[in-house]
Image: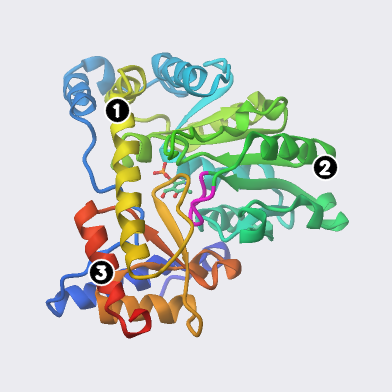
C-alpha cells in the first residue's frame, strides 16, 4: 500500500466524476440523454488552425526543445490580439507567459504567491480549479459569495478587516463559470482600488473573454487603469477557438508575476510543442471570422433554448456571455434533487449548482454545447415533467 502525501488528500473531489457516472448509467440503459452538464466545446477547431499545425509539425525547428518561455512570435500574437480586442498594451517579452492551458496558471498562481496558511479570496460559486491550486499551496480559502441581487459580482464591502489583512490573492472570473454573469469596467476599477489598498494580487480568469452576446464584448480586467500593478489575467484558446484539447493558455499583465510563472514553468514543463505554438499564433493573427461565427452560434443556441424555456413557462435570465446558463431550480428542490429529476425523467443532464460552492445551491448550470434543435428538444422534454404542466 502506497500512502499519498497529505496535500493529495486535500484536493477537492471531482464532482463531475459523479455526474459522468450518472449520465453513463442512463446511456448504457439505452436512453437518449441530452448532455448539457459539462463544459467541453462541441464543435471542432477551425480548419486553418489545424492546417497550420500540420505544416508546422513537419518543420524540424519545432522538433527540438522550444525556447523555455516559448516563441516570441506567439507572445507577440497574443499581445496584438489584446491590443486589438481590448485596447490593452502588453510587452510581449515581459508581460506575457505561455501556459499549458489557462488551468496550469490558475493552479500555479497560489503556489507562486501563497505561503502555507495565507488566505486566498475565491468566488462562490466558482470554478473548482481555484480550490485545487490553493490546496496545493497549503493555503486557506475565504469565499466571496456571488449573489443574484449583486449581479453575481462579489461585494468587497463585506470582506472583513482580518480577511483583508490576511488575503494575498483573489480570483475573479467574468464572463463567469458557472453563473454566466459578465462584469462592467467599473467593477474592475473598484477591484484595482480594493486590491491596491489591501495588498492583494488579482488573478482574473478570462477563459470566456471572447464570448459576449447582444453585441457586448466582454471587458478584460487589464482594461482597468492600474490593473497591471496589482494582477494578471489568464487567457486561453480553449473556448475562443475550440482548442480545449490543444492546451494553449497565457498569463498576461504584472511583470514580476509573469517572471515567477515562467520560472516555475521552466522547472516543470520547459515549453509547449513549437508546432502548437505556431498554430496558436495562426489562430490569434488570422482574420477572426471563426470567432465571430462561434459567438453567433452560441447566441443562437441561447436564444433557441430560452425560447424553449419560455414556452414551458420557465422564466430565467438570459446569459450575457460564456456558454453557460444558470437557472434557479423550482421550489421544493435542491440543486442535486432537481438535476437528478431532469436526468431521470427528462433524460437531460445538467450540473447541480452546489458543485461550484455553497452559494451555487438552488441553481443548475446548463451548457449550450449542443445544437439548437437538441436544446429545444431538451426544453420540450423538461416541459413534459409534471412540475411544469
Ligand atoms: N477557467 C474557467 C472558468 C473554465 O471554465 C475553464 C475550462 O473549463 C478554464 C479556466 C480552463 O481552461 P483551459 O485550461 O482549457 O485553458
Viewed as shown, does residue 68 lie left or right of 302? Answer: right
Q: Dot 2 corresponds to which residue?
A: 198
Q: Which residue is mark 3?
A: 380
What's the distance in space between the residues labelled 3 and 2, CA to CA? 50 Å
User: Relative to 111, is 87 above or below?
Assistant: above
Q: Secondary structure at mark 1?
A: helix
CA neighbours of label 3 inside 10 A, class few (<14), some (14 to 19), many (20+): some
Local secondary structure at mark 3:
helix
Mark closer to the observer (3, 1)? 3
Residue 276 shows which numbered tag? 1
The residue that appears at 32% across and 34% down in the rendered structure is: 241
Picture residue at 67% right of the left edge, 55% below the top = 150
Name the spot of residue 148 as percent of width and height, x first.
Answer: 61, 60
Q: Is residue 135 left or right of residue 272?
A: right
Residue 21 x %, y %: 29, 73
Q: Is residue 54 above or below residue 12?
A: above
Q: Give the x, y percent position of residue 242.
A: 30, 39
Q: 66 and 355: which one is in front?
A: 355
Residue 321 seen anywhere in this rendered image of the structure: yes
The span picked out in magenta is: 175-181
- Lateral position of residue 291 relative to residue 151, left or right: left
Mark 3 vs 1, N-terminal side = 1
Amino acid at each position: 500500500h502506497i500512502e499519498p502525501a497529505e496535500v493529495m488528500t486535500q484536493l477537492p473531489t471531482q464532482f463531475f466524476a459523479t455526474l459522468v457516472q450518472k449520465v453513463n448509467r442512463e446511456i448504457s440503459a439505452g436512453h437518449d440523454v441530452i448532455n448539457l452538464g459539462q463544459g467541453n466545446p462541441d464543435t471542432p477547431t477551425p480548419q486553418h488552425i489545424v492546417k497550420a499545425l500540420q505544416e508546422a509539425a513537419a518543420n524540424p525547428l519545432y522538433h527540438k526543445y522550444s525556447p523555455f518561455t516559448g516563441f516570441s512570435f506567439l507572445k507577440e500574437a497574443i499581445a496584438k490580439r489584446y491590443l486589438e480586442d481590448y485596447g490593452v498594451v502588453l510587452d510581449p517579452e515581459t508581460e506575457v507567459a505561455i501556459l499549458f492551458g489557462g488551468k496550469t496558471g490558475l493552479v500555479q498562481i497560489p503556489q507562486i504567491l501563497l505561503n502555507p496558511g495565507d488566505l486566498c479570496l475565491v468566488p462562490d460559486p466558482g470554478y473548482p480549479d481555484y480550490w485545487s491550486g490553493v490546496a496545493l499551496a497549503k493555503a486557506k480559502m475565504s469565499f466571496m459569495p456571488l449573489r443574484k441581487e449583486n449581479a453575481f459580482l462579489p461585494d468587497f464591502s463585506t470582506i472583513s478587516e482580518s480577511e483583508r489583512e490576511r488575503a494575498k490573492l483573489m480570483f475573479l472570473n467574468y464572463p463567469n463559470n458557472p453563473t454566466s454573469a459578465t462584469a462592467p469596467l467599473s467593477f474592475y476599477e473598484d477591484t484595482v482600488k480594493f486590491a491596491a489598498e489591501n495588498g492583494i494580487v488579482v488573478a482574473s480568469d478570462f477563459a470566456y473573454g471572447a464570448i459576449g452576446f447582444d453585441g457586448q464584448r466582454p471587458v478584460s480586467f487589464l482594461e482597468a487603469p492600474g490593473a497591471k500593478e496589482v494582477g494578471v489575467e489568464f487567457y486561453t484558446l480553449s473556448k475562443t477557438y475550440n482548442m480545449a484539447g490543444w492546451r494553449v493558455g497565457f498569463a498576461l499583465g504584472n511583470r514580476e508575476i509573469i517572471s515567477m510563472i515562467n520560472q516555475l514553468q521552466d522547472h516543470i514543463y520547459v515549453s509547449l510543442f513549437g508546432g502548437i505554438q505556431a498554430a496558436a499564433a495562426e489562430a490569434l493573427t488570422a482574420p477572426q471570422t471563426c470567432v465571430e461565427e462561434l459567438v453567433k452560434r452560441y447566441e443562437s443556441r441561447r436564444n433557441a433554448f430560452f425560447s424553449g424555456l419560455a414556452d414551458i413557462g420557465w422564466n430565467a435570465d438570459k446569459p450575457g456571455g460564456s456558454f453557460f446558463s444558470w437557472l434557479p431550480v423550482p421550489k421544493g428542490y435542491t440543486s442535486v434533487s432537481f438535476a437528478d429529476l431532469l436526468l431521470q425523467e427528462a433524460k437531460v443532464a445538467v450540473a447541480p449548482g452546489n458543485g461550484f460552492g455553497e452559494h451555487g445551491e438552488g441553481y443548475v448550470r446548463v451548457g449550450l454545447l449542443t445544437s439548437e434543435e437538441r436544446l429545444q428538444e431538451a426544453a420540450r422534454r423538461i416541459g413534459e415533467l409534471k412540475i411544469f404542466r
